[in-house]
Amino acid sequence: MKIVIVGNGVAGIFTAQNIRALDKEVELDIYSQEKYPYYWRIKTPELIPGKITTKDLIVYKEDWYRNNRIDSYLGKRVVEIKPNLKELIIEGEKEPISYDKLVLALGSIPNIPPSIKNAINMVGKGVFTLRSIDDALFIRDFIKEKGVKSAIIIGGGLLGLELARQIKNCNLDTTVVEFFPRLLPRQLDTECGEMLKAEIEKMGINVILGAVTEEILSNGEVEGIRLKDGRIFKTEIVLIQAGIQPTIDIAKKAGINTNRGIIVNQFLETNMEDIFAVGDCIEYNNQIYGIIPACVEQSKILASYILGKDKIEYGGTTPKNTLKIVGINLTSIGQINLPEEESGAWEILKKADKKDCCYQKIVLKDNKLKGAILFGESKNLSFVSKNIDKEIDKAMMKKLLELYIWRCPSCGWEYDEAEMQVLFKDLADDFKCVGCGGPKDEFIKK
């Protein structure tokens, strides 16, 4: 059997790796339009200030493919799928490529909001998106050749903020413009978002929230942006990191069912026999994930199913991000903002230490761990990751978070840090007991 995978990103490479782990003999080919072996895409912004080289990004070098008996065809763009013939057409190649099973790991491209006037027209001429190594190198060269002094990043998500940090490392006047009223709206709540904003501004990066970019101002070259409220910000380069669009064009052209993404069932099958899809390009139950944990989970299920082994159903992936954002440890997993219609059924344990830039929030429902934010602190990461959606002991969780109850020895009144907005140590020195007016320094930690 010959399995062909189109795409050499996380989804494609993990699918190949899992297939080979289960079957040492099956023929396995990977086609990628990029010329690089599998690399760590999240680190591509670091290429711009020259902190790392292209070689530093490569995760699996050519000998990895060879040792795993995976034939890798780099710089080969698939332009057409012929499902009835089980063939692929490669750009510039006369002969089609045959397959028995086809896996589409097409990934995604950065989204350029069509509502931003002049954005698409100025791509490559002062407006850029960042997805690949070549994108980063192009931005780097543009900054050097044009002597760019200022930059605006549209989008305050994970990649947008890391991009802003690396642009700042190029000694550019750097501004982040975010549509939502807080940074990382999918990963953080309002309070933690404010802490992150403060830390980013300490780095000398300007942050503008709740801002809708209406137009790229240009006169042959980028001159600035205009917001919907009329404000104008001057700049020489605009970098747009406003989400992703699943790559679906060749699938759609081949008659494969698509919506926002390539539509798959619980086994990652498309509507076409022997054609599967995995990763950022898929849509499952009307949802697009676009996160690494989903790619990894899907690849395991698909590898087993495509080889006729265990039939494990994909039921979706709990959102999880664990990384360093602008140099600060961050884990965001599961439900972090409570549904308003169910607010009474949920509990929150929270520790906010703004002085040390540490924020830990645990979301519980019926004593089950449903979500967490660990910002600036990672010692509870293992516990949280292992126990998501499991029942936990709330008292033990308070101990892990180092949330204490402080008791007044005079009247017995208690200050429970788990229920307060401020840690006891952060209270003003002249804080008085609510019960009897006793001084703060006489309280005893239980």
Image (tube, rainbow, N blue to C red):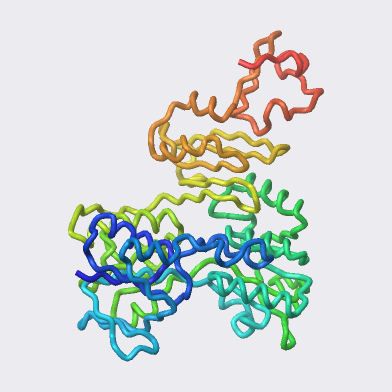
Q: Which residue is most to the top?
A: 410
Please give the name of the residue rendered at 37% of the width and 65% of the height, measured from the top-left corner.
Answer: 65
Residue 197 x/y as whole percent: 69, 52
Q: Residue 145 falls in which quadrant of the image?
A: bottom right
Pick out the residue farthest to the right: 430
Q: Nearer the viewer, residue 341 or 174?
A: 174
Total labels: the figure holds 0
x and y, in percent, of residue 174 in the image: 74, 64
Q: Is residue 242 left or right of residue 106?
A: right
Q: Nearer the viewer, residue 440 or 359?
A: 359
In the rendered image, the residue lying farthest to the bottom is 94
Q: Position of residue 36 (x, y in %)?
A: 48, 71
Where residue 260 appears, as percent x and y from the top left, is 41, 71
Identify which residue, 426 or 276, lies in the foreground. Answer: 276
Residue at 55% over, 43% down: 373
Q: Which residue is depicted at the point 64% across and 59% down?
A: 161
Residue nearest the viewer, comparing 219 with 182: 219
Is residue 225 shown to the viewer in this render? no
Q: Is residue 217 above or below residue 165?
A: below
Q: Is residue 37 left or right of residue 309?
A: right
Res. 404 in view: yes
Quadrant in which the C terminus appears: top right
Image height of 419 relative to 339, above or below: above
Q: Say which quarter of the image contains residue 80.
A: bottom left
User: In the rendered image of this protein, does residue 195 appear above or below residue 183?
Assistant: above
Tell me if 48 is positioned left or right of 62 in this view: right
Image quadrant where one finds the N terminus: bottom left
Residue shown at the point (37%, 74%) measured from the top left: 31
